[in-house]
Amino acid sequence: MPDGSLRQPATRAHPARWRDVLCVLSHREGDLARLDELAAADAPVVTVIGKYNHGKSRLLNELMRRDAFAVADRRQTVQLAECRHAGVRWLDAPGLDADVAGEDDRHALRAVWLSSDIRLFVHAAREGELDAAERALIETLRADSQRTGRETLIVVTQADQMEDDDALGRVVSAIADQVPGAGLHVVSSTRHRRGLEDGKTLLIQRSGIPELERALADALARVPAARAHETRLLLGEMRAELGSVRRAAAETLASLRQQQEAQRHAFDDGLKALLAAIGQDMEEVVALPGPDLALVADTGRDRYATTAAKLERARIQVAYSRACIRLDGFLAGHGVSSLPQEQQTAAGSLNTVMVAVMGVSVKFRADLRRMFCEASGRARLQAAFAHYFELSRSQAVLRDRITETAAALDAADRALAALPPDAAP
């Protein structure tokens, strides 16, 4: 862009390389946009910011020695305007608080935080002390200067509109007390323009513009070092933050996987021990000599009689019920009770893991021997219950957390890989 040309700066979009970083550090969008500005920047950028009608545009025109920016008593600068002069990009921000919707403020603050290397904060002397909003913004800008190296110069404008030097001195002293150590530049654009037009050197000196220009020249000389520092700072902060996110995700993932493994071991070991204990108890039930009397069918005359077959069936059923109670208690302790939703039926009483594995049929002595006393039977029960353990709600939740945490770890790795070396934003 040639010197003296005036345009509206366009909003820069994040390049695709920041997509992975934004997935993890969405709150760093502004910093990434600033890195884009730093990477693309050539000429240093000076932004003039302040409230409406405090003399921002007129000050810029004096610094550039030409009427590049519109000056009016009504709201004139409604967007961020830019002009390049003497190797510097000058930005004229809309007046703060000039519009109710706050669109001007958004343009102004974008210029201050995204584009600027140096900020000139303008306050009209005739307005007296800084108000609360101005003080808050100045303190924020000064804190940013300490952090990033971007400098802020506070300029008290329209000094010629004060009734006398004493009145001006009181205002300047009051502002200095509000922002101690800031250093104030008191200027009059009107005096400077008149001095230039009339060739009055003393009037030019009294305008305060030459002193401000010297301070600006010193600040501009420090811009390259400040940009390099800010680039290292932003990349370093984000790299450290991503490293912290990655460490937390890795630690959480390791803990979750350890928890998953421990729960599975506890289930497997506990169930194996329980089935072995039930098998030992069941040996006494099924070890009786002779035929299984429970298999003897009742006759009509045995309907109300106590028979050996009935007693045997009752004995076997009691033993089986006790085994089921022990198994059900163990399963409940590990969150394995109900069937997964997709396996459930309209009959609610059948929607249990115990029914799914053990069935609802009457068990006889041979059934108990096969299920509990033989190693192959216990292995089948172990595998069947373990299947439903993995399908249990608690294990599904744990697996989801592991998947999410693994994805977060992978995202942090991708984001770290997307960050360039400190010196190359």
Image: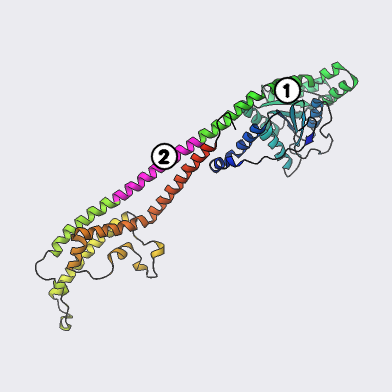
Residue occupying image coordinates x 85% and y 16%: 202
Residue position for label 2: 251
Kindly identify the amino acid type of the residue bearing the numbered disc 1: Leu
Kindly identify the amino acid type of the residue bearing the numbered disc 2: Glu
Q: Which label belongs to residue 216?
A: 1
Q: Is residue 147 visible?
A: no
Local secondary structure at mark 2: helix
Residue occupying image coordinates x 39% and y 42%: 254
Residue 265 on the magenta span: yes
Toward which corner of the image does residue 340 lie, by quadrant?
bottom left
Q: Quadrant of the N terminus?
A: top right
Q: Is residue 272 visible?
A: yes
The residue most toward the right is: 198
- Residue 143, placed above or below residue 258: above
How much space separates mark 2 and mark 1, taking CA atoms? 50 Å
Q: Quadrant of the C terminus?
A: top right
Residue 109 point in image, percent of width and height: 69, 36
Question: Does the magenta stretch mainly form a helix, a strand or a loop?
Answer: helix
Q: Nearer the viewer, residue 94 or 16?
A: 16
Residue 227 point in image, percent of width and height: 63, 27
**Residue interval drawn in magenta:** 242-266
